[in-house]
Image: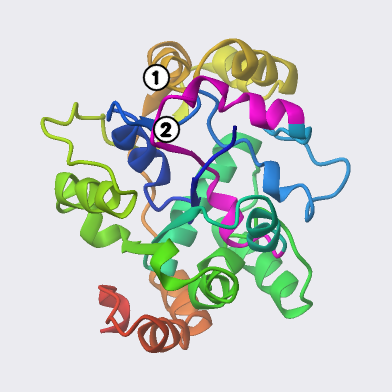
């Protein structure tokens, strides 16, 4: 027993939100453990650690054991989109699976990615400093799973999947369009998975910019042992609810500076045209229109 569909990315492109709604359908099964990172293991260093990461095949397949009576069985790990070996290894194990990809304006995606990683790692470097770091890594062709610049070159990453999977097995959506009409897009994905429509979605609270609620919460969230234990013992949705109540609070995300936005626009100057040519669709990204 294993998955027959994968939500492979991108990060900060509503993959968790999509998983939440798909899992409301009685014919769909997605494990409680969010983002198992199983197919990232070929590209990350041996010392790499992630709270939810699984590297053992038996443990990975065990995630899907309860899905035996479901028509669509899947998982969502958004880093699969940019890991160089993920597409090939997924193809080897599940050649008939379906691939779901969500893409987003790479400028806004990078900004959201920065604050997500900053929250997890409590990294004190500024957004501009991280752009310096990750752009340099890209120029040196040095892979880093958290490189929020590399993640935004969607056309290159999508091609990796298109080389291995026929078009009928790949569905691509735009984040900007998805958030405007979630029910329509969820049913479109269900149709892609050959599942009936889902009516009366139970709304998920919108994601927001979060910071540690207090010093105690900050101390615990910095502890790998605490995070690992919480991940192993508490399913992702209840864990998020506990986190929202006791450990984090909503705050206003800092605005991106005009300088940084223009710099990212320059970095991604060819990506808009590359993706438009690849998909035959004009991406709804205001920065490039």
Residue 81 appears left or right of 202: right
> In x, y percent, where is residue 219?
65, 18
Q: Are marks 2 and 1 in contact (CB under 8 Å)?
A: yes
Check disc 1: other Cα within 10 Å, few if <14, some if 14-19, many if 20+.
some
Q: Which residue is mark 2?
A: 210
Quadrant of the rendered image containing residue 90: bottom right
* Quadrant assignment for the N terminus: top right
> In x, y percent, where is residue 88?
68, 63
Of residues 9 and 208, the one nearer the viewer is 9
Judge whether residue 257 can be spotted in this image.
no
Of residues 248 and 1, the one nearer the viewer is 1
Of residues 121 and 27, the one nearer the viewer is 27
The residues tagged by marks 2 and 1 sit, at their Cα atoms, a distance apart of: 9 Å
Was residue 76 drawn as part of the magenta stretch in this picture?
A: yes
Q: Magenta part of the protein: which range? A: 58-84
Q: Indicate the secondary structure of the residue bearing disc 1.
A: helix
Q: Which mark is residue 212?
A: none
Which label sits in the foreground, 2 or 1?
1
Q: Earlier in the sequence, mark 2 or mark 1?
A: 2
Check disc 2: other Cα within 10 Å, few if <14, some if 14-19, many if 20+.
some
Quadrant of the rendered image containing residue 198: top left
> In the displayed structure, would residue 215 be above or below residue 26?
above
Q: Residue at x 31, y 63 (%)?
A: 174
Q: Residue at x 50, y 17 (%)?
A: 235
Judge whether residue 26 can be spotted in this image.
yes
Q: Residue at x 65, y 37 (%)?
A: 121
Q: Which residue is mark 1?
A: 244
Q: Indicate the secondary structure of the residue bearing disc 2.
A: strand
Residue 143 appears left or right of 247: right
Residue 169 appears left or right of 82: left
> In x, y percent, where is residue 111?
46, 57
């Amino acid at each position: 027993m294993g998955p027959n569909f994968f939500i492979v990315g991108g990060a900060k492109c509503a993959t968790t939100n999509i998983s939440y709604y798909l899992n409301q359908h009685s014919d769909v099964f997605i494990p409680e453990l969010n983002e198992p990172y199983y197919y990232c293991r070929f590209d990350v260093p041996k010392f790499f650690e992630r709270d939810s990461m699984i590297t053992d095949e038996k443990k990975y397949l065990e995630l899907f054991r309860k899905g035996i009576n479901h028509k669509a069985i899947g998982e969502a790990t958004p880093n699969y989109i940019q890991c160089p070996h993920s597409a090939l290894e997924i193809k080897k194990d599940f050649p008939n699976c379906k691939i779901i990809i969500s893409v987003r304006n790479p400028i806004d995606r990078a900004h959201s990615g920065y604050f997500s990683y900053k929250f997890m790692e409590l990294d004190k470097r500024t957004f501009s400093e991280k752009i310096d770091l990750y752009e340099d890594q890209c120029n040196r062709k040095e892979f880093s799973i958290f490189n929020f610049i590399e993640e935004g070159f969607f056309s290159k990453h999508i091609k990796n999947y298109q080389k291995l999977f026929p078009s009928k097995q790949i569905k691509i959506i735009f984040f900007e369009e998805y958030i405007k009409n979630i029910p329509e897009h969820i049913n479109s994905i269900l149709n892609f998975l050959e599942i009936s429509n889902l009516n009366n979605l139970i709304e998920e609270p919108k994601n927001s910019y979060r910071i540690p609620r207090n010093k105690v919460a900050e101390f615990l969230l910095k502890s790998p042992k605490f995070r690992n234990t919480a991940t192993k013992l508490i399913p992702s949705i209840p864990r998020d609810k506990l986190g929202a109540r006791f450990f984090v609070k909503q705050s206003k995300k800092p605005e991106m500076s005009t300088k940084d936005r223009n710099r990212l626009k320059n970095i991604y100057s060819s990506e808009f045209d590359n993706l438009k040519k690849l998909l035959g669709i004009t991406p709804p990204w205001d920065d490039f229109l």
